[in-house]
Image (tube, rainbow, N blue to C red):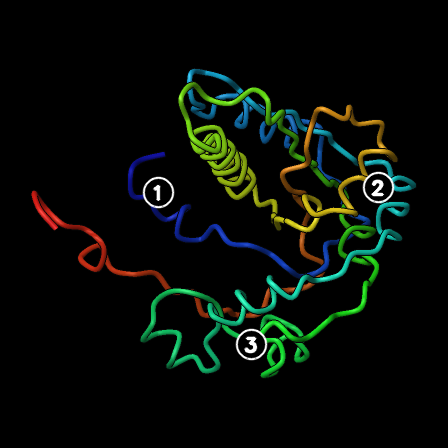
């Protein structure tokens, strides 16, 4: 792969929020490549500060799908600030996402001001129908040296996820991050169900699979290099 092919892969990589084909498994060799890509991610002090639980047992995925989680008012309020309500608005801002990607109840004035209490709902079809769910774990006590709030350790998890994501993309596997798995009380329930040691925390969940239908076009925006790069001084 040359530099232009790699850049094109990065441009095409995206989050797939649609349902995956539950009857199309991910091959062992494909999954192994994805996991090995995670191994070679750069981490602070070569800490390799992550563990991954691979869930591909349909009965376990079904049990997880029955668990409930509520969207926090803080998330709704801060999510609202990142939204654009038209494609023209999104093209102009060059950051954030289209409001149409989220439920209508998240787009109200109440949500904007953090005053909307969403009832808990099951994780549901997204989890049950995915052939593979990865849970990324980390030990908060293994922080990078002299790294306030373990900033370097958290950044290392991001490096690992980018490696994993690009390897999935080059093999035609769709990916969707579910940050909800890091939230309490859901996180505690999942840890108990899967016998995850108390010292480990769940950073996030990762759905892997093949789309069950064509992914509709989504407007994707990025800033131009000149929008965020300064040379020699700000």
Report the mark closest to the observer, 1 or 2: 2
How far apart are labels 3 and 2 at the CA level? 30 Å
Q: Look at 61% across and 48% down and name the residue there.
A: 177
Instruction: Tell me where residue 191 appears, x and y as whole percent.
Output: 80, 34
- What residue does disc 2 label? 189
Element type at marker 1?
A: helix
Q: Look at 53% across and 72% down and name the residue there.
A: 80
Which of the two residues, 219 or 186, is positioned nearer the viewer here?
186
Task: Answer few, some or many: residues within 10 Å of disc 3's Cα (few below 14, many 20 plus, some between 14 and 19).
Answer: some
Of callouts 1 and 2, which one flags the residue occurring earlier in the amino acid sequence? 1
- What residue does disc 3 label? 112
Proximity of marks 3 and 2: CB atoms separated by less than 8 Å: no
Of callouts 1 and 3, which one flags the residue occurring earlier in the amino acid sequence? 1
Which of the two residues, 56 or 76, is positioned nearer the viewer here?
76
Q: Residue furthest top?
A: 46
Q: Quadrant of residue 18?
A: bottom right
Element type at marker 2?
A: helix
Above or below — where is 43 with respect to 68?
Answer: above
Report the mark closest to the observer, 1 or 3: 3
Of callouts 3 and 2, which one flags the residue occurring earlier in the amino acid sequence? 3
Label annotation for residue 5: 1
Q: Look at 81% across and 58% down and name the residue there.
A: 125
Q: Look at 67% across and 56% down and name the residue there.
A: 211
Above or below — where is 70 with respect to 58?
Answer: below
Instruction: Tell me where residue 203 appears, x and y as whole percent.
Output: 63, 38
How far apart are labels 1 and 3 at the CA level? 40 Å
Image side of residue 190 versus residue 78, left or right: right
Instruction: Tell me where residue 9 appears, x and y as whole percent.
Output: 42, 46
Label annotation for residue 39: none
Q: Quadrant of the N terminus?
A: top left
Task: Answer few, some or many: residues within 10 Å of disc 2's Cα (few below 14, many 20 plus, some between 14 and 19).
Answer: some
Element type at marker 3?
A: helix
């Amino acid at each position: 792969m040359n530099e232009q092919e790699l850049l094109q892969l990065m441009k095409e990589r995206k989050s797939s929020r649609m349902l995956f084909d539950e009857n199309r498994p991910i091959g062992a060799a494909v999954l192994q490549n994805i996991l090995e890509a995670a191994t070679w991610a750069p981490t602070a002090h070569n800490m390799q500060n992550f563990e991954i639980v691979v869930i591909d047992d349909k009965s376990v995925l079904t049990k997880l799908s029955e668990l409930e989680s509520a969207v926090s008012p803080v998330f709704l309020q801060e999510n609202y600030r990142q939204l654009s309500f038209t494609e023209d608005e999104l093209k102009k801002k060059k950051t954030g996402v289209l409001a149409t990607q989220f439920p209508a109840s998240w787009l109200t004035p109440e949500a904007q001001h953090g005053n909307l209490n969403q009832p808990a709902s099951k994780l549901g079809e997204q989890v049950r129908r995915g052939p593979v769910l990865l849970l990324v774990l980390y030990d908060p006590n293994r922080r990078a040296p002299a790294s306030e709030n373990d900033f370097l350790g958290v950044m290392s998890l991001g490096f690992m996820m980018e490696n994993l994501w690009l390897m999935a993309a080059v093999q035609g596997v769709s990916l969707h991050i579910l940050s909800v798995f890091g939230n309490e009380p859901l996180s505690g329930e999942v840890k108990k169900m899967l016998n995850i040691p108390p010292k480990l925390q769940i950073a996030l969940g990762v759905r892997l699979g093949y789309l069950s239908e064509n992914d509709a076009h989504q407007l994707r925006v990025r800033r131009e290099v000149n929008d965020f790069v300064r040379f020699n001084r700000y």
